[in-house]
Image (spheres, rainbow, N blue to C red):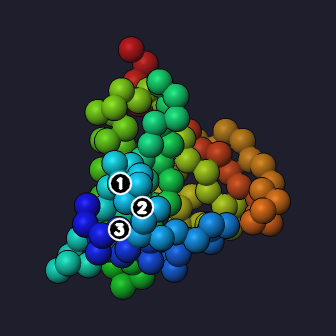
Amino acid sequence: MTKQIAEQIADLLNARNQLVNTYTGECILKSRANYVYLVDSGKIIALAESKKVQWYQWEISHVVVAEEYEGKGYGNEILALAEAKAQDGGAKVLQCTIRTSNDSSIRLFSRKGYSQVNRFFYPKSGNWVYVYQKVISVK
């Protein structure tokens, strides 16, 4: 991952997600192994973070598609890449958190077999958040 790509990822995360922290290219570079992304003509058009939480559990977060690329299947594609990364890393359970007001992410994860297992209030953001999980291996 180049510095330019890392900065594009940070810019897209900051512009499209309601995050409590501001991301920088330097921050992204430090955890570059966690990110999957799609590029079109040198521009990041979709990304997700996929990271190991425990030996059996991976978290998929910050799934985002650039506004001009929405509705063209890139959300499905980037989620599939994030899931494949987790599966290659030995994941048995995938988890994500989604703001209860984020209808497009709720639809995406629900269509891909994730189930809402809980919810909580996150005081730093002032948002209620759903916890979704998906079992990908029972062996």
Mark 3 nearby-residue class (10 Å; few <14, some 14–19, many ≥20) = many
Q: Please identify the quarter of the rendering in which residue 12 is found.
A: bottom left
Residue 128 in view of the camera: yes
Q: To which residue does mark 2 refer?
A: 28
Instruction: Please report the residue visible at 50 percent of the width from the left and 54 percent of the height from the top.
Output: 61
Q: Are circles 1 and 3 on residues that touch, CB within 8 Å?
A: yes
Q: Secondary structure at mark 3?
A: helix
Mark 2 nearby-residue class (10 Å; few <14, some 14–19, many ≥20) = many
Q: Is residue 70 left or right of residue 38?
A: right
Q: Is residue 102 left or right of residue 40?
A: right
Query: Label 1 is placed on what type of residue?
Result: Arg
Q: Is residue 57 above or below residue 27?
A: above
Instruction: Please report the residue visible at 68 percent of the width from the left and 51 percent of the height from the top.
Output: 130
Q: To which residue does mark 3 refer?
A: 6
Query: Label 3 is placed on what type of residue?
Result: Ala
Residue sitting nearer the eye, 89 or 133: 89
Marks 2 and 3, how far apart at CA: 6 Å
Percent position of residue 30, x then y: 41, 55
Percent position of residue 50, x then y: 42, 47
Instruction: Please report the residue visible at 35 percent of the width from the left and 68 percent of the height from the top.
Output: 6
Q: Are circles 2 and 3 on residues that touch, CB within 8 Å?
A: yes
Q: To which residue does mark 1 refer?
A: 32
Marks 1 and 3, how far apart at CA: 8 Å
Residue 35 in view of the camera: no
Q: Are circles 1 and 2 on residues that touch, CB within 8 Å?
A: yes
Point out the tag, 1 or 3, that comes first from the N-terminus.
3
Quarter containing the N terminus:
bottom left
Point out the tag, 2 or 3, that comes first from the N-terminus.
3
Mark 1 nearby-residue class (10 Å; few <14, some 14–19, many ≥20) = some
Q: Secondary structure at mark 1?
A: helix
